[in-house]
Amino acid sequence: MRRLLLVPLAWVLAGCPVDFQGWGGMKQQPKALPYRESTFFEDERVMRQPPAGTVPRNRRGQDRFFLTGKDAPDGGYVESIPLTLTREWVESGGKSFDIYCATCHGVLGDGVAQVARNMGLREPPSLVDLPEYPDGYYYDVITRGYGLMPAYAEKLTPEQRWAVVAYVRALQESQRAGLEDVPPEARPRLLKEGTP
């Protein structure tokens, strides 16, 4: 009796290689594999091309400036952020900055971070001390990466990347500001806290 039970058990554990009713098992089933030829379609390609004029759902209503950070006519960078700035939106850029950028560029964007100190080849630059680049340049660097910095297009949506650019601009302004740039009603509080 035990030997009779071992035969079906061995057959099940072997992955059903036996052909039942002419099926041929899972390995022989008809299926289309990517990048292979197919006689089913007229152009003999398995992977289908989208119809002409279609736009991916996640990019509907977004223009080239928004998606690339570059001007269409000359290929130069967009000078300003193509979205309406709000406090909440810039703060969301700060959250993304803290997650993805602060580990190398520092919480203040000044390049002071433990990861930056441990980098042997080249330390990340201070974002505060960079020359005046257009906003589209920062967006392009976040999207495609630069030097040792990886691309973040897979991790951040276009809106999040533009929010990070807005936050970097806010960091630059805050680090370059002097006491004369602070509203008069806020100056006593800053002087009391010991901030020059």
Image (cartoon, rainbow, N blue to C red):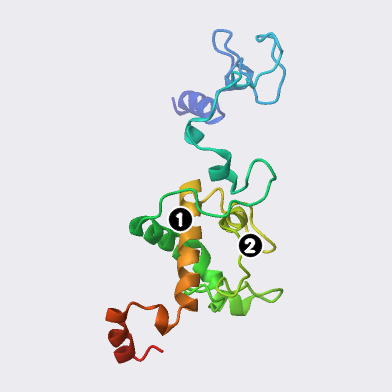
Say which of 181 and 151 sits in front: 181
User: Mark 2 belongs to which amino acid?
Assistant: Met
User: Mark 1 belongs to which amino acid?
Assistant: Ala
Q: Residues within 10 Å of mark 1 (few under 14, many from 20)?
A: many
Say left or right for 159 vs 71: left
> Residue at point 44% right, 24% down?
1
Say which of 144 and 19 sits in front: 144
Q: Is residue 157 visible?
A: no
SS category of the residue bearing label 1: helix
- Quadrant occupied by the C terminus: bottom left
Q: Quadrant of residue 120?
A: bottom right
Q: Is residue 43 visible?
A: yes
SS category of the residue bearing label 2: loop
Q: Position of residue 39 (x, y in %)?
A: 70, 9
Q: Which residue is mark 2?
A: 149
Q: Position of residue 2 (x, y in %)?
A: 45, 28
Q: Which residue is mark 1?
A: 163
**Contact? badges 2 and 1 (CB < 8 Å):** no
Say which of 92 and 39 sits in front: 92
